Amino acid sequence: FIPSIRYLPHTATKNCTSNQTVENEVEDSKQKIVQSLTMSNKSPPNIAIIAISNGTQSGQPNPVNALSAHVRQYLQKSLATSLSDPKVTAIVLIGRPDGKGVFSAGADIKEFSGSDDESSTGGVTTSDPDGIPTLNDLAHLIEKSPKPIIAALTGATLGGGMELALAAQYRVADESLKYGLPEVKIGLIPGAGGTQRLPRLCGVRHALDVIVRGRINGTASEGLKFGFLDGVASEDEGILEVALRWASWASTLSPEKLDSRRLCLKTVPNDEEGMDNSDLCDFALQSVPPKDMGGESVHATIEAIRASFELSSFQKGMEAEKNIFNDLLYHSLAGRAYRHIFFAERSSSSGRQLSKMKSAPSVVGSQLKKGKGAIGVIGAGTMGRGIAISFLRAGFGPVTLVDVNPKGLDAGIKYIQTTIHGEVKKGRIPGSKAKGILNHVKSSSDISYLADCDLVVEAVFENLKVKKEIFTKLNNLVVKKDALLLSNTSSLDVDVIASSLSPERRQYCAGMHFFSPAHIMKLVEVVRGQATSGATLEIICAVTKRIKKVPVVVGNCDGFVGNRMMHP
C-alpha cells in the first residue's frame, strides 16, 4: 500500500497546488496503487533503482559512499539512462542495493587540493574539463528530472550526500538516518545547493542550526518534524520497500505536482515563530567567533544562507554560494588548516602505522577494545584526576585512583565527583548514568589495590627515579602478565621506565601522554618504546578512541612531539 497518513501530512496536502483537479488526481492515484501493490510484493518494473555504492571503483574501498569522480560519473550515466528509458516512470536513489549502511557521507575530501587550479574543487562547484560531473551538475539533473526521484536515506547522509537528497522530489528514511551539513568544520560551506535548498525546504531557522553548527546528528524524527523528510519506515518494513511505494505513487502524479516539489522554484518561507529571516541571521552572527579567530567559514555560511532569501532568484543564490565556496577553498588559510587537521587526525588514528609491526597476543586487549576493564591511575593531581574522568565517562570500571598523599587523594575524588555532577547539571550526562559512573570510582593510598587492573596509567610528577620505583612495584604486584602498564610522562625516556619491568612485561609498556586538562583536551601521544609490541600500540589507540580522544603514535625521544613543538 501507499505511505500511510502518518507519513504523509505535508506531501499530499501542504505542498499540493491549489488546483482541485490536481488534488483529485492524486487521491485517485493513491487508491489505484493501493489496489495494485497490495496484490503483489514484487518491485514494480517501471521503477529504476540506482545505488550509489555501485559506482565505487573496483579495488577502491568506499564504505561511506564518498561521492568521488568515479561515483559521480556512474550516477550521471545511470540517471541519464533511466530518464531516457520510456519504460521507467520513477527512480529510487539509495545508498546500497540492500538498503543497509550509509546513503552517502558526502564529497571525497581527498579531491580538495586547495590549490589555485579551479579543477581542485572536489567536484562540487566547477565542472571538470574531462567531462566528470560536479555535485552541482548531479543535483540539477535530479531536481529537474521529469520523472519523480525518491531519495531513500539510511545512516550517514552528510554534506554532498544530503545535498543530493535535497534535490530529489521526495525523501524517505529509516531510523538509522543521521543527516547534516558539516562543511564548516573543514573551513568550507555546502557548495552543491545546501545553503539555498535547505532554507527553502525547512526554513532559515533549521538551516542555520544544521549548517552553521556543522551538525551531523539530525535524526529521522527531526527530519520529519522540520519537513526534510516526507516519510519514515516503520519498524516492520525496510527502506527500499518504503521507497518503492512512494515511487509507485509519485509516478502517477501530474507535471504540476512534480513542479511543486522542485525547491529551485520555491522561495524561502517566513519563520514559523514570527522572527524576520534577516534577524535570525543577525542573531546567529552574535554567537559565532570572529573571522580572524576561526570563524571565517561560519560567517561565510550565514552570508550564503542570507543570499537564499535576499537575492531575487534561486539561480542568483546558487551563484553566490559558488563564489563564497570557491573563495574559501582558494584563499582561506584557516580552511586549509582545518582540512589538514581533518586528514592528520584520520591518519593518526587509522592504525596503518601499526600494520607492519609484529603483534604479540593479549588476553586483556580484546576486553579493553570493547570498553571494558579495570583501570588504575596513579597520582590524584591535575593529570591523574582528569585521566580518571576520561575513563569513567567512557564506561570503564572500576577506575581506582591511587595517591600516597591522603589529602591529595581526597581532593582528587572530590574533583571527580564535582565534575560529573556539573556535567549532569549541564545536561551532558543523564543523572542515572552519573550514578553508575561514580559507583565505579575507587580510591586508595596503597598501590597494591591495583593488582587486578587490566590497564594502569602512572601520572605522578616528572621524576624518573620515582617513576621507575612505581613500575618496579607494578611489575611485582599486577597479577595479569599482559596488563598494560603505561606512563603519562611528557618528556622522560619510556625505555628507561620500561627497564624497571621484567623482559616479558616490557612489550606491554608504553607512554600514554595526555595533555592538561586531561578530561578536556583531545590529543593523546602514544609513545612507542623499543620493546613495545604492535598489539599494545593497537590496544592503546583503540582505548584512546573509546575515551573520545585522538591517539597519535610517536617515537621515544626527549619531549616526544607535542612538547618539542612548543619548546624546540
Image (cartoon, grey):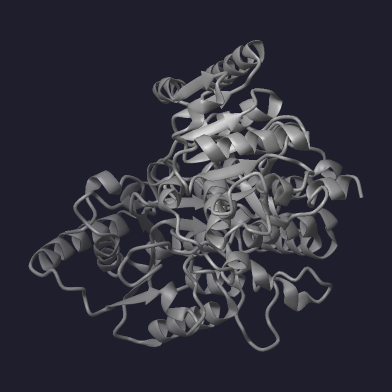
Instruction: Tell me if I can see residue 181 in this picture.
Output: yes
**As drawn, is 95 to the left or to the right of 447?**
left
Instruction: Tell me if I can see residue 524 in this picture.
Output: no
Which residue lies at the image location 39% right of the left edge and 22% below the top edge?
Answer: 432
**As drawn, is 136 to the left or to the right of 11?**
right
Q: Nearer the viewer, residue 513 or 136?
A: 513
Where is residue 329? Give x, y as percent: 77, 63
Q: Nearer the viewer, residue 118 or 264?
A: 118
Dividing the picture into quadrants, the one containing residue 319 is bottom right
Dividing the picture into quadrants, the one containing residue 295 is top right
Where is residue 544? Give x, y as percent: 57, 46
Q: In the displayed image of the protein, which residue is found farthest to the top?
A: 407
Dividing the picture into quadrants, the one containing residue 333 is bottom right
How many numbered discs sit on the rendered protein?
0
Where is residue 209? Give x, y as percent: 58, 40
Q: Nearer the viewer, residue 243 or 141?
A: 243
Which residue lies at the image location 53% right of the left edge and 45% below the top edge?
Answer: 484
Which residue lies at the image location 73% right of the left edge and 32% below the top edge?
Answer: 466
Where is residue 512? Give x, y as percent: 65, 45
Task: Locate the N terminus and report the quarter of the image it occupies.
Answer: bottom left
Q: In the displayed image of the protein, which residue is found farthest to the left?
A: 39
**As drawn, is 2 to the left or to the right of 537?**
left
